[in-house]
Amino acid sequence: MKKTIAMLPGDGIGKEVMDGAKEILKAIGEQFHHTFTFQYGKIGGEALDHQNDPLPEETLALCKNSDAVLLGAVGGPKWESNSPEKRPEKGLLRLRKDMKLHANIRPVKAYESLADHSPFKKEYVENVDMVIVRELTGGLYFGKPSERQHAGGKESAVDTLFYSKEEVDRIIRTAFEMAKGRKMKVTSVDKANVLESSRMWRETAEEIAKEYPDIELEHMLVDNAAMQLIKNPARFDVIVTENMFGDILSDEASVLTGSLGMLPSASLSEEGLHLYEPVHGSAPDIAGKNLANPLAMILSAAMMLRQSFGMEAEAEAVENAVKRVLDGGKLTPDLAVKGKTILSTVEMVEEVKAVLAEEDAILSIMEAYA
Ligand code: NAD
């Protein structure tokens, strides 16, 4: 297969982890006989420095002419006092809007070898393997009016929680599709005891569930979901929820696994061009020091292989290689514990590549004797 990937490293550790993902994709391309073309574009602070625009037109055009977009991270202290329109984050927000990304997908998986890093007891987090599907374009963050009001000498403020039936239908369908290849369970999170939008959400989930008779649907109130994520996180498979609930719950869930440097994400568009990025930011405190954990970026690239290119075996090869490196006790400083080998960013990428090459060699020998 031939695929063109838009590479937007951005700022801080974005560049370092993106270099790592490229190395891994090149290795996968060679092993599985694919041609990946990497097209680089500027976004965020780097784009501001060069073009005074956090999302130059040419970057957007480059993304639209690609099969998928990989993004590192944007932002940093250098641009913190910029005006709102000239902030690095504005570039990412505009990109998400222009690409019409409606669903944010965040897998949260506990690795046995990293159990000591979780703030929770081992028995609570083992077997955690869930995906949070968050609606990205509607809800309280975008509803109008959203403003400060002054009437009769009194000040007040209003935000509006609006959802069209189509928006709810689209995100719940995404969650059911996701559950198909997993444990076949969808937990729809709402606040149906209070909110009308949640009651429509719940009805819509029930309607869609009829089209997926093999998939179990449960409803959960958001306050209970926040508790269950701590008390019994392994009970979840796919969680689907509206924009603000998803924003909060996905950050809560991300703490389960121990390090931001391990968490990948995907943002999907109905038009088929998706964006993949690590959950972490540009980490200015460690940028340029070869200390960043590149695994969240590498796992984001694996999500791209599976979701955008339909390359299941290739995605699995990357995920298994990451697991094997961690199981072997080799870790970047953010995961460091006594008795383990500490690797730099570049060394971690080399380790993942070495495991991929080893697996490939074993496969070739098995094929030769088959
Ligand atoms: P951050 O995620 O950049 O860093 C938080 C902490 O986690 C830091 O101590 C950092 O060193 C550590 N960390 C993050 N990723 C790591 C990795 N891969 N390996 C090892 N350690 C890692 O969040 P922050 O400090 O709040 O934000 C820094 C900048 O990043 C800000 O300008 C913020 O606006 C931006 N940001 C961007 C995005 C994005 O591009 N999507 C997301 C979050 C924050």
Image (cartoon, rainbow, N blue to C red):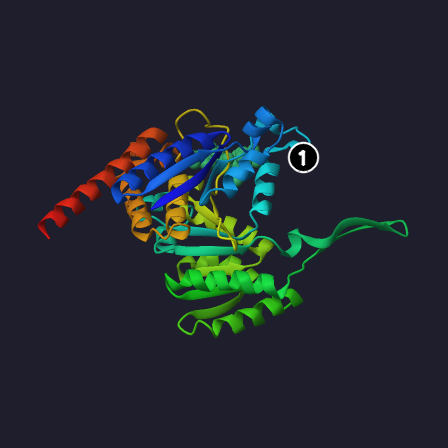
Neighbours of disc 1 within 10 Å: few (<14), some (14-19), many (20+): few
Residue at the location (51% across, 30% down)? 11
The residue positioned farthest toward the right in the image shown: 152
The residue positioned farthest toward the left in the image shown: 369
Percent x, y of residue 100: 57, 50
- In the picture provided, is 8 more to the left or to the right than 32? right
Q: Foreground: 82 or 231?
A: 82
Residue 215 occupies which quadrant of the picture?
bottom left
Query: Does 245 appear above or below 71?
Result: below
Q: Is mark 1 within 8 Å of ligand 1?
A: no
Tell me if I can see residue 262 in this picture: no
Q: Amino acid at mark 1?
A: Glu
Residue at the location (51% across, 41% down)? 63
- In the picture provided, is 334 more to the left or to the right than 88? left
- Which element carries disc 1, helix, strand or loop? helix
| Residue located beneath label 1 in the image | 85
Residue at the location (62% across, 69% down)? 200
Percent x, y of residue 76: 56, 30
Tell me if I can see residue 163 in this picture: yes
Q: Foreground: 2 or 279?
A: 2
Query: Does 370 appear above or below 5?
Result: below
Residue at the location (37% across, 63% down)? 183
Query: Does 37 appear above or below 97?
Result: above
Q: How many marks?
A: 1
Percent x, y of residue 224: 53, 62
Q: Foreground: 361 or 344?
A: 361
- In the picture provided, is 65 more to the left or to the right than 166? left
Percent x, y of residue 275: 48, 45
